Image: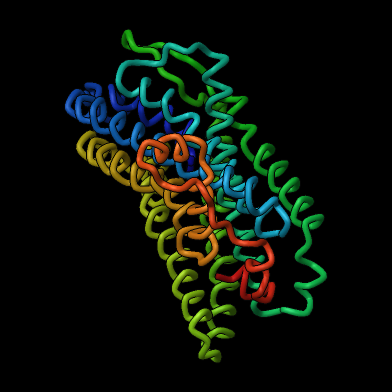
């Protein structure tokens, strides 16, 4: 996920590149960052690999369960499916960045553009689908009658298509400006802007689309949902309130520090903040907050599934029916009979309760 001029691909490429050396107009010598580079060469690849493995496993499991049991029959299913795809796009780029940090960019100019673009698309689309799911829950709980007409698979598919188009369009600066460049005997994938205006545009775009707009939408939706649910004494509704707070807290705790850091990095880029020691401290902070933010894509399956009632049932059925599980159980003498639950038993709740929990 990417953010502020020079964040992720844009920023990620620039930040990784800047770990080697920076120049300041008011300084007679360049700012050497060997200690920062040594720290990043083991810290970032380690955590990138962890996020890649967890994100790949968790979101792949989400897709398998959706296909096998949910069959994409509701608007929420459509959004969950696309959110998992967004997270997979995001983690797909991490092995490339991991190798870049550990050594240098060896994949050429073409892959630099494509990986940066895919990476940014995964970021934007993931944020947008989280917003759509917030709106979906808001309609299901607060406007139940209207939701019966509006929350259909057709509208969910149309909204998802619009989100992908917007994410692709918003990510085009990565495709245009990302380049493989060599300096100080080191090759990097970074964004080369033609003007300060473009750098400012990318910075504002990232912070508005990636933080401000999601914050406003989620705050409104979940505030209204909580107000509605607080009048109910239903135990299931209380669980919905807990999940709602988990969604909000996890999203903002994991992302806000990184966005603030990238805004500070932009101030360094344009010369508002300067100094070698400040730049080094921001590089360290960037690596820590970036890792924290990236873990969010691993938590989406936990937030949207494992805290729900039905996914626990689906996941048990999935592993019980897994061919590998059956083969492993044969030597143990365990019966292969699977006590699957009928689909009708999953439809006993109202639409609003089912999608809100």
Residue shown at 62% from the left, 75% from the top: 353
Q: Quadrant of residue 351?
A: bottom right
Residue 18 at x, y = what percent?
33, 27
Q: Colour mode?
A: rainbow
- The residue closer to the viewer here, 87 or 265, is 87
Above-or-below relation of 29 to 279: above
Q: Is residue 215 left or right of residue 280?
A: right
**In this rendering, is residue 181 above or below 270?**
above
Above or below 113: residue 79? below
Residue lying farthest left?
35
Pick whichever, 82 or 37, lies toward us. 82
| Residue 128 x, y percent position in the rendering | 61, 52
Q: Vertical placement of 206 versus 340: above or below?
A: above
Q: Is residue 259 visible?
A: yes
Which one is nearer the viewer's eye here, 32 or 241? 241
Relative image position of residue 327 (x, y in whole percent) = 45, 34
Q: Position of residue 245 (x, y in %)?
A: 45, 71
**Placement of the C terminus among the 4 image quadrants:** bottom right
Q: Residue at x 54, y 17 (%)?
A: 111
- Residue drawn where x is 43% and y is 27% of the image: 13
Is there any visible trace of residue 203 in the rendered image? Answer: no
Q: Quadrant of residue 328?
A: top left
Q: How many marks?
A: 0
In this rendering, position of residue 176 left or right of residue 97: right
317 and 38: which is toward the camera: 317
Residue visible at 23% across and 23% down in the picture: 28
């Amino acid at each position: 996920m990417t953010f502020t001029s020079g964040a992720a691909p844009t920023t990620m490429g620039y930040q990784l590149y800047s770990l080697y050396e920076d120049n300041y107009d008011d300084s007679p010598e360049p700012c050497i960052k060997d200690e920062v580079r040594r720290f990043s060469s083991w810290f970032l690849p380690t955590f990138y690999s962890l996020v890649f493995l967890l994100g790949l496993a968790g979101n792949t499991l989400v897709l398998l369960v959706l296909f096998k049991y949910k069959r994409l029959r509701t608007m929420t299913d459509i959004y969950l499916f696309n959110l998992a795809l967004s997270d997979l796009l995001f983690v797909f780029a991490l092995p490339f960045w991991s190798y870049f940090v550990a050594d240098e960019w060896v994949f050429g100019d073409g892959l630099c553009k494509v990986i940066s673009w895919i990476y940014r698309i995964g970021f934007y689309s993931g944020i947008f689908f989280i917003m759509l799911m917030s709106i979906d829950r808001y309609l299901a709980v607060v406007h139940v009658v209207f939701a019966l007409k509006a929350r259909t698979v057709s509208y969910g598919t149309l909204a998802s298509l619009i989100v992908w188009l917007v994410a692709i369009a918003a990510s085009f600066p990565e495709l245009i400006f990302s380049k493989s460049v060599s300096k100080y005997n080191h090759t990097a994938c970074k964004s080369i802007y033609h003007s300060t205006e473009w750098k400012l545009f990318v910075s504002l775009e990232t912070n508005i689309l990636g933080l401000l707009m999601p914050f406003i939408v989620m705050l409104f939706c979940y505030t209204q949902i909580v107000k509605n649910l607080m009048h109910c004494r239903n135990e299931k509704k209380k669980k919905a309130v807990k999940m709602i707070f988990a969604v909000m807290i996890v999203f903002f705790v994991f992302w806000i520090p990184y966005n603030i850091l990238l805004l500070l990095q932009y101030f360094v880029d344009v010369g508002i903040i300067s100094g070698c020691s400040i730049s080094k401290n921001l590089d360290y902070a960037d690596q820590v907050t970036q890792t924290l933010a990236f873990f969010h894509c691993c938590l989406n399956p936990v937030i949207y599934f494992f805290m729900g009632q039905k996914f626990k049932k689906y996941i048990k059925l999935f592993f019980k029916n897994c061919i590998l599980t059956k083969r492993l159980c044969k030597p143990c003498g365990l019966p292969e009979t699977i006590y699957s639950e009928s689909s009708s038993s999953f439809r006993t709740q109202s639409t609003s309760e089912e999608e809100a929990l």
